[in-house]
């Protein structure tokens, strides 16, 4: 669940005056009360009643509140929504009726939604402090607070997920009382409770009156983005550019196919503006996101699009990244880092097209949190909101996910490419900082006509020689599952050896999921290695146990092996997979590095530079093609367990006598019990040795 930062409630009058200028006319002075009932049969009745009360005020011209139902599938729970819509974009009656015939809400419909309303029952402890936690919370109270926060997050996510916004406002009702919320990517700023049952409804009405007269930018809508109607001439041009073209390279055809898939009629289409300080203003056309971080309200909200350059629609599609970057003074801008690396000729990294911050768009929760605590904010033990700046970047390469490799040889070559990029950057005193499975990609190289690895996401890259505050920032971000044991255990400085260890754990994750191997309890093993839980201490402990013992299957008294097995065929027992040498050598380096031998054994410093590991992957990937399985990639074994195809067991020898018949029957029964783990050739050797021993004793007796 998304963490909702607990901020000190703001006075409603100060809140309204701070975020909305006073419109012409005298302030609202109404003594009317909103008679909200405390007992409702259904959620739809509760939300519909709130919508009707708000519409009666008639303070929002050309807009009205509507209540809709949503159910994505029969197994999902029914959710009820109330929000503000323009009258010309209101939800159809099939969604707003009490017995709605349709429960499918499209992103296109949600893109017009504004000012969501959340209704909860009145319960004093929760109503007084709906966000955060309290040390006096009982277990039932914690469950109620968690359920409330989940409900708030679910109803607020769509407005930031399907729209182009810097922030939004919302109304949170607790029975007859209401809080006004302002939500940005850093947290939630809420007003104190406004009791609409005691004649203080005028504060709510004044907010609605000023909101109706506020500009779209004051409401949080991004002014640098324009929606493209699906029936417009520009939309027709986008559809025409998505058609396949004869003579295009495999990479350009792949990018164009992804762009065609993104032209979803159920999603809004957009025209984005990027203001680059050195390259000037550029515009790009995009539709449904290619990548998007879902189920998050507070955070960076990164979205990736396959886009067209509005100035050159006939050019190949590019990759467009829209995110909220860290605003710390010592954090680097990704586009600036890429420009430096591109200028130096670093291989296997994205090529920058343009980048820039979105003007005047930054989160404000941190400033209010500091102001509300005053001088004592520096000594507060509470979780501090993170400050972000809205940022956009465009790169030339449209990539394929790393998990889409075709066989193990392509996987090895992809790792060699990405480690090469890392080595070239380190020569420029730049270290990546976030080696993870999502930051390794494949890109089609037109010069070599092959898919090569690409190391992306340089947004937290830093200099290798850092000050203490920069070290602290680098340690606080990144992907926890793949961090080295030393960094996971608390060491702030991130060194080359830590990044190379991260490459190894990423390698293990792909091998476990997509290549045949001898690990039986894969789900349990993968959970121990890579699944994040609330307590992170065990995370590095299990990896340390694996390294100390020299194998990830040491707890199961086995040695991990990648099997030589093509899809649909039985594993070749007497043939070793080329990647077994890679796994064994790197594991031995980690083992020697972590153990405190005296004197140090040879190879203990192999991971302190890139040379050894690059030679290892290069030797593996350049091995003759006949030494590799042709099609050994499997479906994701965490989702679809691999079917083990066993070779037929050898037939037992024909029985020549009573004793031989008993031996044959015993061998057959033993094969049935032990199954594939029993090796027939070893059993036959033991039986032959036993017979030879019996014959020798007989000869000695005679």
Image (cartoon, helix red, strand yellow):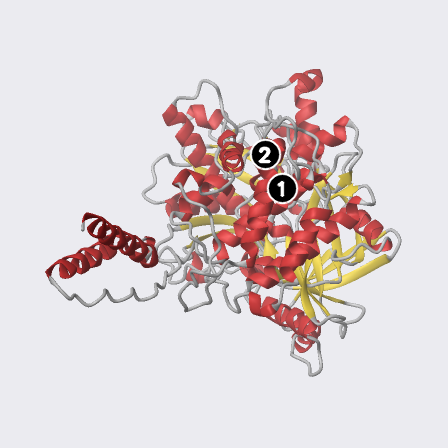
Find residue 376 and name its label.
Answer: none
Relative placement, left or right, of 576 versus 380 is left
Which residue carries the number 1 mark? 501
Q: Position of residue 52 (x, y in %)?
A: 46, 47
Q: In x, y percent, where is residue 675?
A: 28, 56
Asked if the residues shown at circle 2 and circle 1 are in contact, with their CB atoms under 8 angstroms apart, the answer is yes
Q: Is residue 459 above or below residue 73?
A: above
Image coordinates for residue 610, horizontal then vertical, percent: 72, 46
In depth, the one of 7 and 623 nearer the eye is: 623
220 up-or-down from 72: above or below: above
Q: Camera-side residue: 42 or 523?
A: 523
Q: Residue at x 62, y 31 (%)?
A: 486
Task: In the rendered structure, find residue 485 and report the number of the disc placed on it.
Answer: 2
SS state under label 2: helix
Q: Residues within 10 Å of mark 2 (few under 14, many from 20)?
A: many
Residue 221 visible to an observer of this rendering = no
Residue lying at the far bottom of the rendered structure: 246
Quadrant assignment, res 289: bottom right
């Amino acid at each position: 669940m998304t963490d909702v930062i607990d901020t000190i409630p703001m006075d409603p009058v100060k809140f309204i005056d701070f975020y909305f200028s006073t419109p012409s006319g005298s302030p609202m002075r109404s003594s009317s009360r909103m008679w909200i009932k405390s007992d409702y049969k259904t959620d739809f009745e509760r939300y519909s009643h709130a919508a009707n009360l708000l519409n009666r005020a008639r303070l929002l011209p050309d807009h009205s509140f509507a209540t809709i139902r949503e159910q994505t599938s029969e197994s999902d729970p029914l959710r009820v929504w109330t929000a503000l819509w323009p009258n010309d974009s209101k939800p159809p009656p099939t969604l707003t009726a009490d017995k709605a015939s349709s429960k499918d809400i499209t992103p296109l419909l949600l893109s017009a939604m504004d000012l969501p309303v959340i209704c909860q029952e009145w319960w004093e402890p929760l109503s007084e402090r709906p966000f955060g936690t309290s040390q006096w919370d009982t277990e039932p109270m914690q469950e109620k607070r968690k359920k409330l926060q989940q409900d708030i997050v679910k109803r607020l996510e769509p407005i930031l997920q399907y729209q182009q916004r810097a922030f939004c406002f919302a109304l949170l009702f607790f029975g007859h009382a209401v809080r006004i919320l302002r939500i940005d990517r850093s947290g939630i700023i809420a007003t104190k409770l406004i009791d609409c049952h005691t004649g203080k409804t005028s504060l709510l009405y004044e907010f609605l009156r000023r909101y109706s007269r506020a500009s779209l930018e004051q409401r949080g809508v991004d002014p640098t983005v324009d929606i493209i109607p699906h029936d417009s001439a520009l939309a027709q041009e986008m559809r025409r550019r998505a058609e396949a073209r004869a003579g295009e390279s495999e990479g350009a055809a792949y990018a164009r196919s992804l762009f065609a898939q993104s032209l979803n009629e159920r999603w809004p289409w957009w025209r984005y503006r990027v203001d680059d300080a050195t390259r000037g203003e550029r515009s790009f056309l995009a539709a449904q996101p290619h990548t998007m971080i879902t189920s998050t309200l507070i955070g960076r909200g990164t979205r990736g699009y396959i886009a067209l350059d509005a100035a050159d629609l006939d050019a190949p599609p590019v990759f467009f990244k829209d995110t909220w970057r860290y605003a710390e003074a010592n954090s680097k801008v990704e586009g600036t880092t890429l420009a430096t690396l591109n200028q130096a000729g670093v291989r296997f990294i994205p090529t920058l097209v343009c980048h820039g911050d979105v003007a005047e768009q930054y989160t404000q929760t941190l400033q209010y949190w500091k102001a509300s605590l005053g001088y004592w904010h520096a000594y507060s033990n509470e979780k501090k909101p993170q400050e972000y700046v809205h940022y956009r970047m465009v790169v030339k390469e449209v990539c394929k996910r790393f998990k889409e490799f075709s066989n193990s040889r392509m996987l090895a070559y992809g790792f060699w490419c990405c480690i090469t990029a890392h080595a070239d950057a380190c020569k420029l005193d730049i270290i990546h900082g976030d080696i993870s499975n999502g930051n390794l990609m494949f890109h089609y190289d037109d010069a070599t006509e092959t898919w090569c690895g690409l190391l992306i996401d340089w947004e937290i890259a830093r200099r290798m020689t850092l000050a203490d505050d920069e070290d602290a920032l680098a340690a606080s971000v990144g992907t926890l599952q793949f961090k080295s044991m030393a960094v996971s255990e608390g060491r702030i400085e991130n060194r080359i050896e830590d990044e190379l260890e991260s490459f190894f754990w990423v390698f293990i994750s792909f091998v476990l999921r997509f290549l045949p191997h001898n690990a039986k309890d894969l789900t349990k093993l993968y959970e121990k290695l890579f699944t994040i839980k609330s307590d992170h201490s065990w995370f590095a402990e299990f990896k340390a146990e694996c390294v100390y013992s020299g194998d990830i299957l040491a707890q199961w008294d086995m040695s991990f092996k990648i099997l030589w097995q093509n899809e649909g065929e039985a594993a070749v027992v007497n043939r070793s997979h080329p990647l077994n040498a890679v796994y064994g050598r790197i594991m031995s380096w980690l083992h020697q590095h972590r153990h405190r031998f005296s004197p140090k054994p040879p190879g203990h410093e192999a991971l302190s530079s890139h040379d050894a590991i690059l030679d290892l992957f290069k030797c593996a990937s350049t091995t003759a093609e006949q030494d590799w399985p042709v099609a050994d990639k499997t479906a994701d074994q965490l989702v679809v367990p691999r079917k083990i195809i066993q070779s037929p067991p050898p037939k037992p020898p024909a029985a020549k006598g009573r004793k031989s018949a008993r031996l044959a029957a015993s061998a057959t029964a033993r094969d049935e019990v032990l199954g594939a783990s029993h090796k027939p050739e070893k059993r036959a050797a033991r039986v032959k040795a036993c017979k030879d021993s019996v014959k020798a004793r007989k000869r000695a007796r005679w």
